[in-house]
Image (spheres, rainbow, N blue to C red):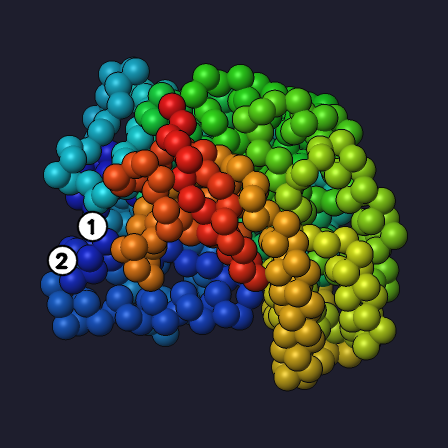
Amino acid sequence: MGLLDRAGARLTSRPEEADILVVNTCSFIDTAKQESVDTILEMARFKTEGSAKKLIVAGCLVERYRDEIRKSIPEVDAVVGTGELESILEAAGIAPPPAAAPGLFNILSSAQMRPGQESLSGTHKHETTAFRAEGDHREQQGRFSRDDWQGAAHMLPTYLYNETTPRFLTTPRSSAYIKIAEGCDHPCTFCVIPNLRGKFRSRRFESVVAEAQQLVARGVREITLIGQDTTCYGEDLGLKDGLATLLDELARIEGLRWLRFLYAYPNRITNKLLETIAKHDNICKYLDVPLQHASPAVLKTMKRGAGADIFLKTIEKVRATVPGIALRTSFVVGFPGESVRDVEILEEFISEARFDWLGVFSYSDEEGSAAFANEGKLQKRTIEARKRRIMKLQQSISKRAKQEWVGREVMVLAEGESEETAMLWEGRTQFHAPEIDGKVYINDFGDLETLEAGRFYRAEITEAHDYDLVARIIAQVN
Ligand code: SF4
């Protein structure tokens, strides 16, 4: 979007008025693939029945089914894989813009922007060189052994964006994601993401810091660091405690109120990382660590290792070092060979660990993953029943835990009117990551007439539900 915007394209979220349609796809599990294909077909209608002249498909589905997309959906004019983002202009038939003067930001006029959107483009005079600079670490990629790297290695994407790559933010004005690394070298047998995203590669330290500074200068107050594997950040650059060092540096940016990272790998949660979270007030007391399972037998076949005992020790250490920290995890149920006892082990673990937030994925049998060849595949209805069981257990844990929030005073980031009713506003605390966790509904503005989206307020929690909280505003925070 940033590249198109800078080249002069006017972005719109209304497909019926677009000349060029771009569908950015996901394809790591069955439901994501289905949603992607449905959206492509839905958009293809605008080409035959509406005014659209071009349909471009981008993202992970392209990495996986490049030829099939072109063959079976003739309306598709071009495909852009995860490693060839810059070719979006060629696909769209738009000429690249002349180089801008260093230090200039390209900002869309407010008339061109949708509410909550902001265009952010850094200097791009040295873009080509900078792209290469980020790619200089390629020869160091692939530190862990994935059995299937060899044959396909030359096909894997190697692209990395940097601080000079133009971005078009679609998140609310005050929040932004920064991708600090791309790809993954872990050998998890259920996962095809490394085949789609390539080997692990970190962005340069200075590039991430520069991007964060630019974002904060443009009014962003909350930054969420992402990557398939954030806790390995910097290993390929020779950095020791890369993520902790990066957090330490970013936390010093004046004006940045909330900083967090998602997708920690369990055995990469170091003391230094936890101490860094504890040390800075503006690093959210929040840890997202997908554990995938708790039964040692299942984790072994998943090629992830460890088990409930080791995880409980890690959680104990996390809570001791960062008191009050919110923990999020996700699990895969229905992995081939998962026994009734394995599910019980998982349930016992969940009861003991008492996560603040928990997601469950049904095992999706993906061609290209190592587990695709495994025996002991379970029936869909068995997998769904196990998923429901785990979610029900978590619901009761969450319900009890959320009650303890009533009466607490917290800082809330107001996000806007609730989709359900204009009488309520929605917000989040530092213990809620954007988009994935429960919500804080605000039903009492205190002395204020109205709230402003993107602002922080002191609030008191007055009610608690299974996952969501209700709050009343005490005062605005400057
Ligand atoms: S660490 Fe995550 S992205 Fe990497 S292989 Fe495992 S599940 Fe997939």
Give how far across and how far down residue 252 sits, in percent: 53, 17
Give the residue number, with chain letter if any, for mark 1.
12
Which of 103/175 is in front?
Answer: 175
Give the residue at x 68% y 38%: 324
Residue under label 2, please give it: 17
In the displayed structure image, the side of residue 71 where residue 340 appears, left or right: right
Residue occupying the point 77% across, 60% down? 351
Q: Do the residues labelled 1 and 2 touch (CB within 8 Å)?
A: yes
Query: Could you tell me which secondary element the residue under label 2 belongs to?
Result: helix
Q: Which of 76 and 151 is in front in this view?
A: 76
Q: How crowded is mark 2: few (under 14 residues within 10 Å), some or many (20 or more)?
A: few
> What's the distance in space between the residues labelled 1 and 2, CA to CA?
8 Å
Q: Residue at the location (69% across, 68% down)?
A: 393
Specify the label residue 167 is tagged with: none
Q: Residue 307 in the image: x percent, y percent?
A: 84, 55
Q: What residue is drawn where x is 47% and y is 67%?
A: 33
Q: Judging from the image, what secondary structure is the residue with disc 1 in?
A: loop
Q: Is residue 260 visible?
A: yes
- Image vertical order of residue 399 relative to residue 222, above or below: below
Query: Amino acid under label 1?
Result: Thr
Residue 91 percent coordinates (x, y): 28, 50
> In which quarter of the view is residue 189 placed?
bottom right
Q: In this view, does 355 lie above or below 40?
A: above
Q: Which amino acid does label 2 sit on?
A: Glu
- Direction from residue 237 to residue 321 in the image, left or right: right
